[in-house]
Amino acid sequence: MSIRVSLLLLAALCAGRAETKFPPLPYAIQESWPTLPAGWNFGETPGVATDSRNHVYVLHRGPNPILEFTPDGRLVRSWGEGLFIRAHAIRIDPQGNIWTVDNDTHQILKMDPSGRVRMVIGRRGQSGENEESFNRPTDIAFAANGSFYITDGYVNSRVVKFSKDGRYLTAWGKKGRGDGEFDLPHSVAVDPQGRVIVADRENRRIQIFDANGKFLEKWTHVGSPWGLQLMPDGTLFIVDGYNNRVLKTDLKGNVLGAFGRQGRLPGELNYSHHIAVDGNGNIYVGEIKNQRVSKFSPR
């Protein structure tokens, strides 16, 4: 047998193991969720978040860009016209404030629960790499003391830390493949120990840092992480946008299970972009190419 054939067989065997190594997570699609008014549709849907009432907030690239739904899918309200050019992420902080990230305005907005803007980080339409400017930021996460981290993002390839009142504290990272470097930091989460977990999308890995940016470890076995959702029990949900699947891990990087495949039908995913999980364990995935948010419930 030639060396080339042997290598091809080895690659095939490895690929087969990669497809079957993660146990399936028992979730079922809720095809009728949500209910939209007649004539309304989602555009590309990059962001989804849930609050303490299990209400779901969807951020999409179309009219009525922010929509709030009840757990059973009824529309509560919509707002946000004129605030975004290319919306990218939405998060709810522990106080119930609503934060959005737009990677064309280069801004992060903090809104109170009524939807009124209370803080602006970044200058609208002005890109840069300093204490006040971003270049296509992607996501935000909150520490227990109220400080927050912004992944910045498509161009700057860094993480920026701010105090709870919006004062710049520090930043780290640059374009590259080395430890502490990024090729599109696309999502971020903070674990109970205060470690900062960064989805390094195009490097196809997760990197973990201490609260001030010291590199601690990396995971290279979770595909291409596009979105992160940390759970109160210390588990982490990852949405892998290139492989169109959802993975669940512990905080040591052990994969506890996965589900999902590429497609256009209900329950399939296409450029799965961000993820949220409510208090009842329902998973919501915002999709770019399918222009929808998909709800998966535990079986």
Image (spheres, rainbow, N blue to C red):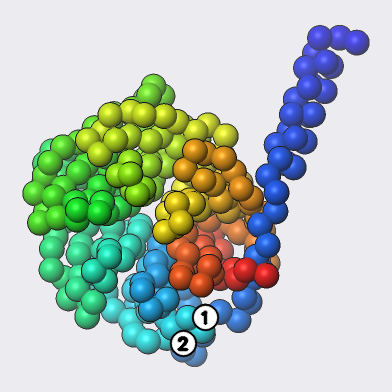
Taking the view exactly as shown, the residue that stands out farthest to the top is: 2
177 versus 271 height, above or below: above
Disc 2 secondary structure class: loop
Tell me which corner region of the image, top left, top right, bottom left or bottom right, holds residue 223: top right
Label 2 with label 1: CB-CB less than 8 Å: yes
Is 175 or 196 nearer to us in this picture? 196
Give the camera-side residue of 260 and 148.
148
x then y, percent, for residue 199: 42, 42
Which residue: 91% across, 10% down? 1
Q: Which residue is drawn at 33% across and 81% down?
A: 78
Percent coordinates x, y for residue 248 in the rendering: 56, 51
The 10 Å Cα crowd at callout 2, few under 14, some 14 to 19, many 20 or more, is: some
Query: Residue at 70% of width from left, 53% of height from top?
Result: 24
Q: Can residue 126 be seen in this view?
A: no
74 to the left or right of 101 = right
Viewer-proximal residue among 196 and 65: 196
Q: In this view, does 23 lie to the left or right of 88?
A: right
Q: Residue type at mark 1?
A: Pro
Classify residue 258 as left or right of residue 241: right
User: Which residue carries the number 1 mark?
Assistant: 34
**Disc 2 marks which amino acid?**
Arg
Query: Label 1's element?
Result: loop
In terms of depth relative to the viewer, which is nearer, 211 or 6? 211
Disc 2: which residue: 74
Q: Does 129 sit above or below residue 38?
A: above
Marks 2/1: CA distance? Answer: 7 Å
On the image, which quarter does residue 259 sit in? bottom right
Q: Position of residue 215 (x, y in %)?
A: 33, 28
